[in-house]
Amino acid sequence: MTSRTDAVDLDPAVLLDVAYRQARLGLDEGGIPIGAALFAVDGTLLGEGRNRRVQHDDPSVHGETDAFRAAGRQRDYSSTIMVTTLAPCWYCSGLIRQFGIGAVVVGENRTFSGGEDWLRDNRIEVTVVDDGRCVAMMADFIAANPTLWNEDIGVADATVPKLTGGNV
């Protein structure tokens, strides 16, 4: 099967450097260290961004959505490459699938795997770099900020009360 991104020989680790720099910026700002970048198949950077949920007090500003917005409107996303320091969550995986982004480069998937398999099942090329910098940054962040991390991935810390009786 021919990949939609085979037009040029791009080094995923080089592309990842852009997303990693964004993740470091986010961490330095007091946010969640996930960075992303959207590239054209020829290697042109279309947009870059980082998770800014904390900085903007907006739960929808994930790294991938920030990079996607920064890229502006594209007529066709099938020959674009989303590069992200961490495997995309279900929200960002949905964005990738919805707009038909052709390929995803993942810095690491050890601390979180998200919708990676689902993307592959939907014929989206996923390359995992397993970058040690990305693994260490996320592992350190999660260890130091478990409550904030759980908030980011939609895991509640408190037990949700069970509703009983009445019309719910």
Image (cartoon, rainbow, N blue to C red):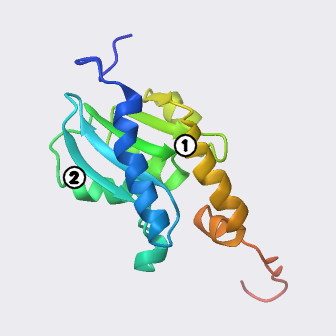
Label ID, residue 90: none
Outermost bottom residue? 166
Question: Image point 44% across, 45% down: which residue?
Answer: 84
Image height of 71 relative to 131, above or below? below
In the image, which disc is placed on residue 71? 2
Does residue 95 appear anywhere in the picture?
Answer: no
Residue 78 percent location from the top left of the image: 27, 33
Give the image quarter of residue 158: bottom right
The amino acid on which the numbered mark 2 sits, given as a three-letter code, is Ala
Name the residue tied to disc 1: 133
Counting from the top left corner in percent of width and height, residue 33 is at 51, 59
Give the position of the N terminus as an image quadrant. Answer: top left
* Residue sitting nearer the eye, 1 or 30: 30
| Rendering coords of residue 130 (x, y %) | 57, 33
Q: Is residue 79 above or below residue 89?
A: above
Q: Quadrant of the C terminus?
A: bottom right
In front of the other: label 2 or label 1?
1
Crowdedness of circle 1 by 10 Å Cα count: few (<14), some, many (20+)?
Answer: few
At x 43% / y 34%, what residue is drawn?
105
Nearer to us in this view, 28 or 87: 28
Residue type for callout 1: Arg
SS for tag 1? helix
Nearer the N terminus, badge 2 or badge 1?
2
Q: Circle 2 — which element?
A: helix
